[in-house]
Image (spheres, grey):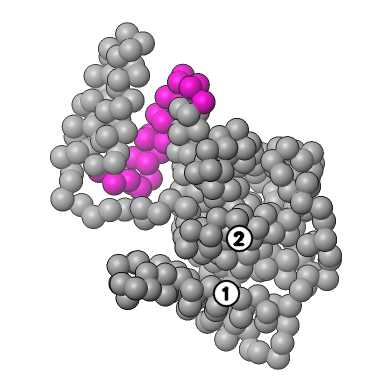
Amino acid sequence: MANVPWAEVCEKFQAALALSRVELHKNPEKEPYKSKYSARAMLEEVKALLGPTSEDEDERPEADDCPGADDHALGLPAEVVEPEGPVGQRAVRLAVIEFHLGVNHIDTEELSAGEEHLVKCLRLLRRYRLSHDCISLCIQAQNNLGILWSEREEIETAQAYLESSEALYNQYMKEVGSPPLDPTECFLPAEEKLTEQERSKRFEKVYTHNLYYLAQVYQHLEMFEKAAHYCHSTLKRQLEHNAYHPIEWAINAATLSQFYINKLCFMEARHCLSAANVIFGQTGKISATEDRQHRRA
């Protein structure tokens, strides 16, 4: 890394995140992505300061990074490998930058470039993806690739990425279980690291989003039983973690009730409608507890 104090690198990264969160309507009318482009430039600066990985990760063939590759998306890690030492830590930090660059390009409707950065992120994490430091970032990158491929109407590719995320979550919880590092912590001083409770909250939110996306994918694939199951799980987890928008939650619950009605499961349908009515009544009384742009979680 260049001779720049680490605190300045972290500060630049946090400034980039702040710019990324600026709502589009707050930008000039003729430059709706101005803040996004500024954030991108700062992320590129941080990437340059970190320097290249000592391992030649970027030279691996792209075929290794597709959802069907044996050692990547659908193949689960054989063991937990933590990113120890300067090489591992640099790889993780670069992966965080590639992730945010990927989201940034997707937000500015540059999908191919966004995909490229997200794939680079996963490539950097390949050997570490089940580790405490990388599992959340890996799942978030795969979730975003799932969304991207879904928007391209390549539903089976989206399904592969999202099911891989679900499998990684389940394996991590079984083999490790402790709340993992949030990706933003890679650029925070030790005294500002998140509490275990906050880490758990953020990680569970990432998994809830994964289930939400899977429900939509299964609906597209006309796997209605499975879609209903994942929709129910999503709604339940959103309530448990107090992470929902009342109107959106109520609409989804009412929609789920129609599935149960068609299956002649009237008790379940009534329960969904009653819950939708109660939650809808919260509209205007509580603030939204979850960012509408699911992509960032």
Question: What's the magenta bit mostly, secondary-structure-wise?
Answer: helix
Q: Label 2 near label 1: C-beta < 8 Å?
A: no
185 left or right of 4 in image: left
In the depicted view, which residue is nearer to us: 277 or 199? 277
Return the residue at label 2: 113
287 left or right of 144 in image: left
Q: Measuring 57% from the left and 74% from the top, which residue is drawn there?
A: 43
Q: Can you say whether 31 is above or below 142 in the image?
A: below
> Can I make out residue 36 in this image?
yes
Q: Measuring 76% from the left and 65% from the top, which residue is drawn there?
A: 88
133 left or right of 293 in image: right
- Neighbour class for label 1 at 10 Å: few (<14), some, many (≥20)? many
Q: Measuring 37% from the left and 55% from the top, which residue is drawn there?
A: 291
Kindly identify the amino acid type of the residue bearing the numbered disc 1. Leu
Q: Nearer the viewer, mark 1 or mark 2?
A: 2
N-term mark: 1 or 2 = 1
Asked whether residue 46 is drawn in magenta, I would say: no
Q: Measuring 29% from the left and 46% from the top, which residue is drawn there?
A: 245
Identify the disc placed on residue 43.
1
State which quadrant residue 137 falls in.
bottom right
Q: Position of residue 222 (x, y in %)?
A: 48, 22
What kind of element bears circle 2? helix
Identify the image quadrant of the N terminus: bottom right
- Neighbour class for label 2 at 10 Å: few (<14), some, many (≥20)? some
In the depicted view, which residue is nearer to us: 278 or 63? 63
Q: Position of residue 203 (x, y in %)?
A: 52, 51
Q: Position of residue 266 (x, y in %)?
A: 28, 12
Find the magenta span and give its range. 221-246
Kindly identify the amino acid type of the residue bearing the numbered disc 2. Ala
